[in-house]
């Protein structure tokens, strides 16, 4: 890890407002370490980045912010990783605009392990949330780290799936690492911090700013060998992550869904554009060329031992599109009361989800 004295220079370089990553990398390329930049003097710095930017960089008073960040990094389990740090994620060095430094909390060794990103809708269908959790769990069981953005919906389900498998997961934030957004994921964030890793390129205290989340997305895709989009509308931020993945040379994968579901249209668009259509966890492993242990099970496999003929009949009649109770009455020939009892049992078993409007949806097994 970067030593305290050297870290001060890196923090000073990155905490000056208006001096972005491109300018930072330009200075580092020309002068080397940050100490050399600040000792080079105004004429040399100005000749490289212009008078206005040079004055901003060299005259800014960021001492308090530097001291606060250094104090944060001095506590157990907290680190600030710079471009020159051996623990810095090597995969991010391959992208066009790697962050000059990363604030990291938890198991930093996960940052350099093979990883897959799992992203999608903040308001997924029950099937979508279940897919995210089960695919993440199956992939984590093969030794892959699951990367996502700690958002509600698919992101949170993916993190939980990885944790349930006893695997590694990385949450990439669009705020300062000392902020938890959304607040509803506070407990999940604490669990990831204890058992996985949380990273952010943004200074401590950075609040929720909409423009920071697309920037965050390039790190989610950049840290992974591939990006699996579980569910996404046509205007979803997950499509930004998928586009960035393609630009970075990462694999783009998508799970198809119902033609009637708005949450599936983004995935269908990606598949039309050449994304890998994914039905099982094995599809993901093959696309990113990751050899899973022989005992790993596909996310779509499940045992139906002990299932009654009646349950199996109702599940077959439902298919996987949402349907109303009246539709099922017509298809099955059963009375509404008897059908409701069967659906209740299937819901308690996690085989069926009840939806608004007295509708039901079968959940994919496995």
Image (tube, helix red, strand yellow):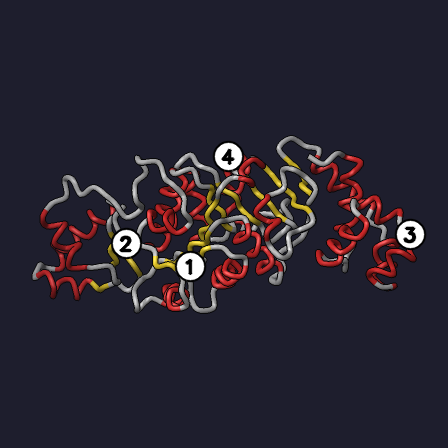
- Name the N-terminal-most of marks 1 and 4: 1
Q: CA distance from mark 2 to mark 3?
A: 65 Å
Q: Position of residue 308 (x, y in %)?
A: 11, 45
Q: Is residue 184 visible?
A: no
Q: Quadrant of the N terminus?
A: top right
Marks 1 and 2, how far apart in space? 15 Å
At horizontal 70% and vertical 42% (from top left) the residue drawn is 84
Label 3 sits on a secondary structure element that is loop
- How crowded pointer 4 is (Cα within 10 Å; few <14, some 14-19, many 20+) is rated as some
Answer yes or no: is residue 245 visible. Answer: yes
Q: Earlier in the sequence, mark 4 or mark 2?
A: 4
At 64% from the left edge and 30% from the top edge, which residue is drawn?
76
The CA span between labels 3 and 1 is: 52 Å
* Residue at the disc numbered 1: 123
User: How crowded is the residue under tag 3: few (<14 C-alpha within 10 Å), some, or many (20+)?
Assistant: few
How many residues crowd around disc 1 within 10 Å: few (fewer than 14), some, or many (20 or more)? some
Residue 96 x/y as whole percent: 62, 57
Q: Secondary structure at mark 1?
A: loop
Q: Is residue 87 above or below residue 322?
A: above
**Which badge, 3 or 4, comes first in the chain's sequence?**
3
Instruction: Report how far apart the C-alphas of labels 1 and 4 lie in the structure.
Output: 26 Å
Pointer 4 with pointer 2, Cβ within 8 A: no
Per the image, the residue denoted by label 3 is 41
- Under tag 4, what secondary structure? helix
Q: Earlier in the sequence, mark 1 or mark 2?
A: 1
Q: Which residue is mark 2?
A: 353
Task: Calculate the distance from the C-alpha at mark 3 to the C-alpha at mark 4.
Answer: 45 Å
Q: Nearer the viewer, residue 176 or 237?
A: 237
Using the numbered discs, state the Cα–Cα distance from disc 4 to disc 2 in whole angstroms: 30 Å
Secondary structure of residue under mark 2 = strand
């Amino acid at each position: 890890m970067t030593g305290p004295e050297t870290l001060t220079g890196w923090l000073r370089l990155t905490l000056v407002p208006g001096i972005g990553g491109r300018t930072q990398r330009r200075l580092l390329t020309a002068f080397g370490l940050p100490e050399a930049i600040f000792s080079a003097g105004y004429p040399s710095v100005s000749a490289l980045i212009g008078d206005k930017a040079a004055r901003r960089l060299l005259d800014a008073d960021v001492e308090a912010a530097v001291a606060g960040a250094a104090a944060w990094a001095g506590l157990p389990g907290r680190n600030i990783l710079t471009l020159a740090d051996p623990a810095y994620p090597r995969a991010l060095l391959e992208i066009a605009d790697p962050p000059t430094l990363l604030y990291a909390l938890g198991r930093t060794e996960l940052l350099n392990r093979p990883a897959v990103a799992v992203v999608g809708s903040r308001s997924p269908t029950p099937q979508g949330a279940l897919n995210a959790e089960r695919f993440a769990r199956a992939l984590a069981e093969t030794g892959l780290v699951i990367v996502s953005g700690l958002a509600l919906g698919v992101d949170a389900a993916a993190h939980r799936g990885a944790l349930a498998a006893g695997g590694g997961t990385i949450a990439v934030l669009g705020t300062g690492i000392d902020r938890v957004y959304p607040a509803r994921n506070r407990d999940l964030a604490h669990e990831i911090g204890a058992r996985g890793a949380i990273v952010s390129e943004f200074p401590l205290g950075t609040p929720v700013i909409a423009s920071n989340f697309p920037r965050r997305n390039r790190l989610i895709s950049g840290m992974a060998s591939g990006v699996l989009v579980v569910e996404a509308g046509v205007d979803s931020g997950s499509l930004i992550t998928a586009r960035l993945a393609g630009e970075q040379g990462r694999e783009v994968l998508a799970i198809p869904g119902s033609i009637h579901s708005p949450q599936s249209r983004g995935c269908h668009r990606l598949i039309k554009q050449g994304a890998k259509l994914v039905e099982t966890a094995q599809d993901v492993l093959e696309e990113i060329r990751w050899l899973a242990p022989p005992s790993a099970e596909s996310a779509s496999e499940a045992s139906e031992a002990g299932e009654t003929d009646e349950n199996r009949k109702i599940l077959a009649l439902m298919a996987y599109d949402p349907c109303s109770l009246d539709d099922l009455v017509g298809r099955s020939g059963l009375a509404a009361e008897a059908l409701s009892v069967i659906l209740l049992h299937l819901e308690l078993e996690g085989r069926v989800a009840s939806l608004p409007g007295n509708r039901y949806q079968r959940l994919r097994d496995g």
